[in-house]
């Protein structure tokens, strides 16, 4: 069976790793903060001291870290994956990064004789733990086909999108939708409450229409109860919006709503809402309404 390495065991990386272990795969892991590997170790994963050690024992290495700089560090930095490279090893990046950075990383890996693929996903740890992510892949098609069984274990739907960078382009477009949906729902809830209605009525009517979404059917009911246990933090959503804006400039695309949304998420982050779920943008909007009424 394929030996899998996971570098980056935050909420998503941990959930993917736990599901792979439950599915019978041999998994080795590395995280800069070693305490974040505890649950995986207890489930049977081998914990490595360096990314290079993960590489030495893995056929497929999945990186799931903060940003492009972090990806480059764990791959090419001291003690990185490249230091432990071997024949027939493949790197699959699950991080959310700029498509141009993905192309640069892919080329650098190719120059090192390492095959690579990008596999960003849609869905949080709550669905990753059951293998119900949606996976978008780009890069080396041969690698995608070779490890298709692994990818179909991680996700219940997979898409191969073509050359390197393609998957990250679609991933950013998807995360843009999520950021704007959270804002739109938050303002709808706030408007309903200020008008003197129970926001649950707003959600019931919304979910009876064409405009219903998975967010309005699920997370919105936690939002109206001020429940913001993070599956994806507001801080990370702000980071992704920064990447979206930078990528849009690379592609000469004007995204005025995304730019305004980025400003609002920055204000929420600066106000101390960064560690809660991204849907906690409602808590920031509520604070604005309360402040105005003081």
Image (spheres, rainbow, N blue to C red):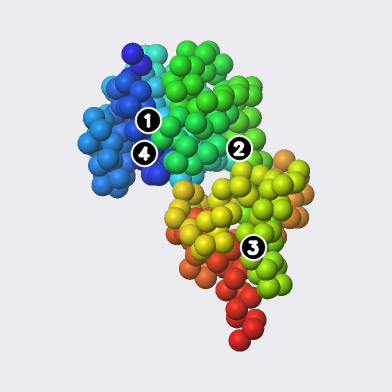
Query: Which label lies toward us, 1 or 4?
Result: 1
| Residue 99 makes an appearance in the image | no
Query: Which label lies toward us, 4 or 3?
Result: 3
What residue lies at 40% left-to-right and 44% top-to-bottom? 11
Give coordinates of residue 255: x percent, y percent: 74, 50
Question: For residue 129, which quarter of the picture?
Answer: top left
Q: Which residue bears the numbered disc 2?
A: 171
In the image, 114 versus 128, the foreground residue is 128
- Badge 2 or badge 4: first in the primary sequence: 4
Question: For residue 138, which quarter of the picture?
Answer: top right
Packing grade of label 4 (10 A; few <14, some 14-19, many >=20) is many
Query: Which label lies toward us, 2 or 1?
Result: 1
What residue lies at 71% left-to-right and 72% top-to-bottom? 195
- Badge 3 or badge 1: first in the primary sequence: 1
Q: CA distance from mark 2 to mark 1?
A: 22 Å
Packing grade of label 3 (10 A; few <14, some 14-19, many >=20) is many
- Badge 3 or badge 2: first in the primary sequence: 2
Give coordinates of residue 201: x percent, y percent: 67, 59
Quick one: SS at disc 1? helix
| Residue 195 makes an appearance in the image | yes
Q: Which residue bears the numbered disc 3?
A: 199
- Badge 2 or badge 1: first in the primary sequence: 1
Q: CA distance from mark 1 to mark 4?
A: 9 Å
Q: Which residue bears the numbered disc 1?
A: 19
């Amino acid at each position: 069976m394929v030996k899998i390495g996971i570098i980056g065991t935050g909420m998503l990386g941990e959930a993917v790793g736990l599901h792979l272990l439950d599915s019978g795969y041999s998994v080795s892991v590395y995280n800069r903060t070693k305490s974040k590997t505890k649950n995986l170790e207890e489930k049977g994963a081998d914990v490595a001291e360096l990314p290079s050690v993960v590489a030495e024992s893995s056929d497929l290495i999945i990186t799931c870290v903060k940003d492009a700089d972090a990806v480059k560090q764990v791959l090419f930095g001291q003690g990185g994956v490249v230091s432990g490279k071997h024949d027939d090893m493949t790197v699959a990046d699950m991080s959310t990064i700029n498509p141009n950075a993905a192309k640069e990383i892919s080329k650098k890996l190719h120059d090192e004789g390492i095959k690579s693929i990008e596999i960003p996903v849609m869905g949080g740890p709550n669905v990753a733990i059951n293998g119900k992510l949606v996976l978008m892949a780009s890069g080396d098609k041969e690698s995608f086909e070779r490890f298709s069984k692994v990818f179909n274990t991680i996700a219940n739907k997979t898409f191969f999108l073509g050359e390197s960078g393609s998957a990250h382009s679609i991933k950013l477009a998807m995360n843009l939708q999520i950021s704007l949906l959270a804002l739109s729902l938050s303002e709808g809830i706030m408007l309903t409450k200020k008008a003197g209605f129970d926001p649950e009525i707003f959600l019931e009517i919304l979910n009876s229409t064409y405009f219903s979404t998975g967010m309005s059917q699920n997370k919105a009911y936690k939002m109206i109860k001020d429940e913001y246990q993070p599956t994806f933090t507001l801080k990370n959503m702000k980071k992704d919006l920064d990447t979206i804006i930078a990528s849009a400039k690379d592609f000469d695309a004007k995204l005025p709503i995304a730019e305004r949304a980025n400003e609002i998420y920055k204000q929420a982050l600066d106000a101390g809402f960064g560690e809660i779920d991204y849907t906690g943008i409602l808590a920031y909007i509520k604070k604005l309404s309360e402040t105005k009424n003081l």
